Amino acid sequence: MTTPGSTPLRRSLYAVHAALLLALVLFSTTASANLTIEITRGSDSALPIGVVPFDGAEGMSEDVAQIVQDDLERSGYFDPLERGAMFARPHRADDVAFGEWRSLDVRYLLVGRGEKTANGYEIGYDLLDVSGGRPVLQERITAGGNQLRGAAHRISDAVFEAITDIPGAFSTRIAYVTSRGVGDNIDYGLYVADADGHNSQEVLTSDEPILSPAWSPDGEKLAYVSFEGERPAIYVQQMASGNRIQLTDFEGINGAPAWSPDGRKLAMSLSKDGQPEIYVMNLADRSLNRLTQNSSIDTEPDWAPDGRSLLFTSDRSGGPQLYRYRLGSGEAERLTFTGKYNARGRFGPDGEQILMVHRSQDGYQIARQELESGRLVVLSETTHDESPSVAPNGTMILFATQQGGQGVLSAVSADGRSSFRLPAARGDVREPAWSPFL
Amino acid sequence: MFPSTPTFLSRRYAPLVRTFAVALSLAVMAGCSSTGGTQTGESYGDGTRGDGTAGGASTAGTGSGGQYGSGTGTSGTGQQADSRIPEVRTIYFDFDRDTIKDEYESVVMAHARYLRANGNANVVLKGHTDERGTREYNLALGERRANAVKRFLRVQDVSSSQISVVSYGEERPATRGSNESAYSENRRVEFSY
C-alpha cells in the first residue's frame, strides 16, 4: 500500500529479525484465563521508533498509542522510545520538528489523533521517516465504540508492514488450554484471546482433559480433542455461535486434528485399528482415508501450506521422528535425523521450514529445521517446551513451557533472538494455537 | 537499552523449580517406600484355575484404593479374595517402556483372577505417561501401556468384553513436579472398575 523505508534498512531487518520484548498485562472475563506478558529476552538490534500519545486520547476508552507501542515492542522488531523521553508530542506530520527526533536516534515516528463520531471513533495517523523527514504512511480508520483495541491492532499491522514489508499479525487471536488441580480433580478450560492476551473468551470448560486446539483456515472454527465423554473425541466448534459438532467417536485415540489448507478436510490420528495411524476425514461426508499402515505410532499430522503433503510424528525407526507423507505418491520420507526425539512438527507459513519439539542434551526444546538443508537450530532457552505454533506471518513461534513448576505460554522470534512469556495468574496454560490472519 | 526489561528472568526460576522438586520428591518417597520387590515373577500362573468359587459380582468392599503394598500378598493366594476387587489398582512403568515389570505381574494376576471370577465385572485400563515429550505422542504411549496390560489379561483368559482401554497420556498426572520421582509416579496404568 505505501512505501516502506529504505531498502538497506529492510534488508537488515530481514537478516536480523530483530527482537526484544515487552511487558503487558491482560485481563479477561474469567480469572482462570488471565495471562500476563513478561519480556524474557530483548534484542539490541530492534529499530527505534517513537509512538506519540494520540490527540483526543482523554476522550477514548483505550490508550490506542500505548496498545500500538506494546504491539510493536512485543514483536521484537522495534524498540519504542519511552514517553518520558519525548519533549514534544505532535499529532500530525506538519507539526513534527524532525531534528528533535533525530537527536533522540528515533528512526520512525507515529503520530495520530482520535475523534468521537456518532458511531464510535475516527482515528487518523501518520507514520513518518525521521531521517528522511517525510511521511511513509497516512491513514484514517474508523472503529466502533468498543472496538478501540481492535483498531489499535490494525494500526500496528499497517505500521509493521510499512516498515518491514511483512504483514503484521497483531489482529490475530490465540487459543490455549488451562488446567488446575491434580489427579482426579482437575478443571480444564479452552480459551481464545487476542494475540496480546486481552479479551479472553471461554470456549469450553470440563472436568475431563482438553487438548490439541486447531484453527480452521478461515479462523471461524476450532477443532479440538475433549475427553468429556470419558474418552477422547474430536469436536469442531464455531467461534461466533458457540455451536459445535462431535466429529469422531471411534474406539481408542481420536486425536491431533489438523485442517487442510482449503478447510475441507481434517487430518487426525485414530487408533481404532490397533495403533495410532494418520487418517484424513472429508468433512462434507465424513469419509475416512487412512494414510499410514504399520505397527508403530503415527500421530501429530500437519498439512503443508500447498496442501500436497503432511508432516507427522512416527516412532517406526524406534523413537519419535518427523516424516513427510506425499499425497500424490503415498510415500513417507523421514525428515529429522538430529537427536533421538523430534515430534509435533509444524510447517512454517512458507512451507520451507518446520518447527518441532526436539530433545536436546538440556531437555525438550523448540527447534527449527530448514527442509532444503536439513539443518536443525534450537530456538528456545527453556527445557520443558512443547506445542509450537507459528504466527501466520512467520515472525514468532508460540509454545508451552514451564516457569516455577507452572505451565506457561512463551513466544520466541523466528530467529531465536527475542522472547516473551504469558503466564496465567493461577493454574497451568498450554497447547497454544495461533490463529490465521482474520 | 531497555531499562525496564528484566533480562534473563527465564534463568531465574530454575532454582525455584529445583526446590519445589526436592520438596515434592521427599513427600512422594515418604508415601510409597514400600513398593519395591514385594512380589516376584514366580507368582505368575499360580492358582489360576479353580477360582470359580466366589461368583457373585458384588463390587462391594471396593473403597480403599490404597496404592501399594499390603493387600497384594493376601489377594495373591486367598480364594475368597477373588470376590473383591484387588486393592492394588495401579502399576508403574519405566520411561518410554510398556513392559509390565516383574514386580507388578502379581498385581495384574490378581486382577485377572478377579475378572475371571466375576464375569460381569468390567475394568477400564487407564494408561498414563509422565509430562515429558509431546501430548499427542504421550497419548499414544499411554495407550500402548494400557494395551500391554490388556494383552496380559487376555493371555490369562479374561474376556475382552470385560476390558476397555483409555489413554490419558500426560493429561491426568497423579502428582505434580518435574523430577524423576514425580515422573515415575505418573507413568502408570490404573485398573478402574
Image: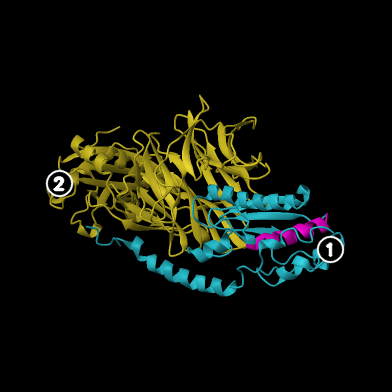
Chain colours: A yellow, B cyan
**Within the magenta stretch, is there residue B120?**
no
Is label 2 in a helix, a strand or a loop?
A: helix
Q: Answer above or below: position of A36 versus A153.
A: below
Q: Residues within 10 Å of mark 2 (few under 14, many from 20)?
A: some
Q: Gap between marks 1 and 2, in whole Å?
A: 87 Å
Marks 1, 2: nearer the viewer: 1
Magenta residue span: B103-119
Q: Residues within 10 Å of mark 1 (few under 14, many from 20)?
A: some
Residue A230 lies left or right of residue B1; in this view the side is right
Total tally of numbered discs in the picture: 2
Q: Nearer the viewer, residue B108 or A433?
A: B108
**At x 18% / y 49%, what residue is drawn?**
A106
Task: Judge if badges 1 and 2 mark residues of a common chain.
Answer: no
Place of residue A264 in the rendered image (x, y in percent of width and height, measured from the top left): 56, 31
Q: Chain of mark 1?
A: B
Residue A298 lies left or right of residue A401; in this view the side is right
Is label 1 in a helix, a strand or a loop?
A: loop
Q: Answer above or below: position of B109 versus A324.
A: below
Place of residue A275 in the rendered image (x, y in percent of width and height, measured from the top left): 62, 42
Q: Nearer the viewer, residue A327 or A219?
A: A327
Q: Answer above or below: position of A354 versus A20.
A: above
* Mark 2 residue type: Phe
Residue A48 lies left or right of residue B168; in this view the side is left
- Residue under pointer 1: B58
**At x 26% / y 42%, what residue is drawn?**
A126
**Residue B177 shows in the view:** no
**At x 46% / y 40%, what residue is drawn?**
A322
- Residue under pointer 2: A98
